[in-house]
Amino acid sequence: MKKLIASCLTLMALTVWPTAANSATMLYSRGTDTAVRLLASHNSERARLNLPPLQWDPQLAASAAAYGPMLARVGRLQHSPRAMRPGQRENLWMGTRGSYSPEQMVRTWIDERRMFRAGMFPYVSRTGNWNDVSHYTQLIWKGTTRVGCVIHSTGSWDYLICRYSPPGNVDGRYVG
């Protein structure tokens, strides 16, 4: 808990919010509160597994924010090309605008753990399809140390875009 509080205080002191060309890229609270909540949601699950906490990375958040308008134009979840985000992985979420808290958004990824089984990636899903647990495995990837997220809102939708580094979900590596 002490580490989580320290991470949150560091986040509040160091966070630089990107200025988006599209004003729809915003955080619910217009400040560090949403970032603190997103980071805490990630780190509570990592703490449950005795994994080191993630640190907030404003550059990753800026990278995520840059993708928000493109994702909104597509109007559905579609990962950005890996060439646009070298050294990063990406989790995406989409839901009705204003209907979900940041914790509920991240919780949908954490809920994938019911299908997760520890093992060598990508053979980590009880269903046989690694896509069923890939958000969760990225969230708990031991080698990942930093995260940055943004909530991009349109008239109808909220998109949560989180970027992670160093990237997880590496074939042939153990996750568990």
Image (spheres, rainbow, N blue to C red):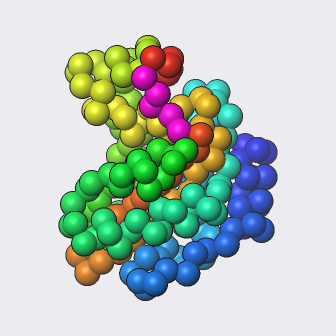
Where's the N terminus, which quadrant?
A: top right
Residue 151: quarter of image: bottom left
Q: Is residue 163 magenta?
A: no
- Lateral position of residue 154 relative to residue 171, left or right: left
Residue at coordinates 61% horizontally, 74% vertically from top-left? 17
Q: Can the viewer see residue 159?
A: yes
Report the front residue among 174 and 95: 174
Image coords of residue 47 (percent x, y): 62, 34
Q: Is residue 31 above or below residue 108?
A: below
Inspect this view and state whether residue 118 appears: no
Left or right of 33 in this view: 169: left
Is 154 drawn above or below residue 159 in the view shown?
Answer: below
In this rendering, the answer to whether 149 lies above or below 143 is below
Depth check: 97 or 84 in front? 84
Residue that sits furthest to the top in the current view: 119
Residue lying at 30% horizontally and 77% vertically, measured from the top left: 154
Residue 168 is inside the magenta segment? yes
Q: Which residues are magenta?
A: 167-171
Q: Quadrant of residue 22?
A: bottom left
Dominant secondary structure (helix, strand or loop) of the stretch shown in magenta: loop
Q: Residue at x 63, y 70 (%)?
A: 32
At 71% from the left edge and 57% from the top edge, which residue is drawn? 8
Residue 148 % position (x, y):
56, 57
Whole-percent x, y for residue 144 in the image: 60, 37
